[in-house]
Image (cartoon, rainbow, N blue to C red):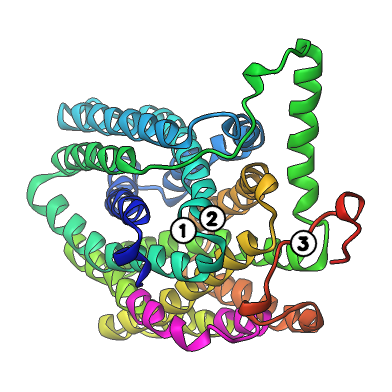
Amino acid sequence: MKILLTNRNFLSMWFSNFISILNSRFSELVIPLVVLGLTSSPLITGLVALSQQLGTVLFAIPIGTWAERKNKVRLAATCYFLYAFCNFLLAYFIFQNQANEVFIAFILFFMGILALISRTAFNTMIPNVAGRQKLLEAHTSLEAADAICTLIGPAIGGALLAAAGAGITLALCGFLFIFSMIFILIVKHREKTTDYRKKHVFMKSRIDDFIRQSVEGLNYLVANPPQLISTLVMCILGFSTVFIVLTVIFHARLSFDLSEELIGILLSSAGVGNIIGVFMMKWFKNANWLLLFSMLLLISSLGVLIILITNQFLVMCLGMLIFDGALSMAFVVQGAVHQGITPDEFLSRVRSATYVVSGIFSMLGTFLAGAIPEVTTSKVALGLGVAMLAVPGIYIIKFKRFSVKFSKIEPVYLKEKSGKKA
């Protein structure tokens, strides 16, 4: 966490990211409850939420390659501004009682594309702004922002939703995104990418180069065992995050008829786990990253199991704490490992490729979170969540020979590029 005191540019990125995540925690609670209230269908609610992830799968590859040639600060700031406008638009139509599930899905689709662009730009800046030698510390600091937002966001969002309504809550999200834009504009980030506009090349050559770079990004996800393991864990995290959170919302509403405030408190208990996880990360700086992955996935599955078997609200909160605490640590490890083994020149295109793959699993998780409770019960969905975390947690142990301590992680190049072995 010292990086926040010594690196002003990273501090500005941290505040921008903090506000952005806080908005996400508000909308993750508000949007599903609004759509569920309009339709009374978990399946339709899941499909509407899925629309926000569709743009990631469709456009992540070209956007990632395109973003390599752009100013990352301006790109992220523009997206935050447009994201604020979308929140204001949603707030207006909901406030006027003119919003329906189709309109909300359309706006969420556009917002998903904006979020994709801003995330790509933001994450590409991290190694340059924070420094490669401080990647684990940087990702731990960013996860701390996520932890704080997860702690306070759902509780505040639930209270606002109950007291002021969805329209005013989403309008507040719009104003917060303006502040997120301001903080990212403060960042001084030196671009290392090539200015393609200064190259006198034919359009066909530029298109061929664009396609080649995009394909390289996908290929790099499975180019060597460390990348393959990191990609597998990334898919698990992408699926579990949306699947478990949405399933818990349905479980709390449909099985226990909890109020907005109590659902917010339940989701906020995950933030307590996040904060504990952030403080615990310092104890694992010299750990073997793959074995740590395995342990965290198993502990996270235990938290979901507790939610599944209990009927007590406080015990459910404990389950959320354990689930998200371990999962937040896994996100820190995955982010640090992924960027640590990826060379600078591949960061943007590889990051966009991860969004495609992770986006597919997030869409699957969103769909199943709505479809399973619609057909059976939310308890069946939670049981699937336990399996999706526990089984891979056990399986990846077989690849431990490809893992090293965090201090020994270094970029792994394609064999045909440098002759280095994975």
Q: Is residue 294 magenta?
A: yes
Identify which amino acid the numbered label 2 is placed on: Pro
State whether residue 101 appears in this view: no
Identify the secondary structure beneath mark 3: loop
Residue in the foreground of this view, choosing between 413 and 271 = 413
Which residue does the image show at 45% across and 39% down from the upper left?
A: 118
| Residue assigned mark 1 | 130
Figure check: 399 above or below 353: below
Q: Quadrant of residue 172?
A: top left
Q: CA distance from mark 2 to mark 1?
A: 5 Å
Residues at discs 2 and 1 in contact (Cβ within 8 Å): yes
Residue 102 image position (x, y, % from top left): 41, 29
Seen in the image, is 134 located left or right of residue 57? left
Please give the name of the residue rendered at 33% of the width and 84% of the height, measured from the top-left corner: 318
| Residue 421 against residue 165 in the figure, above or below | below
Residue 245 image position (x, y, % from top left): 42, 63
Q: Reply above or below: 189 against 329.
A: above
Mark 2 or mark 3: whose residue is earlier in sequence: 2
CA distance for labels 2 and 3: 15 Å
Part of the protein shown in magenta = 274-297
**Residue 90, horizontal then vertical, whole percent:** 27, 31
**Residue 127, which numbered label?**
2
Query: Does residue 282 appear in this view?
Result: yes
From the viewer's perspective, is 120 left or right of 234? Answer: left
Q: Is residue 225 magenta?
A: no
Q: Could you tell me which residue is drawn at 36 percent across and 34 percent down?
A: 77
Q: Amino acid at mark 1?
A: Ala
Task: Name the secondary structure under disc 1.
Answer: helix
Residue 412 is labelled as 3
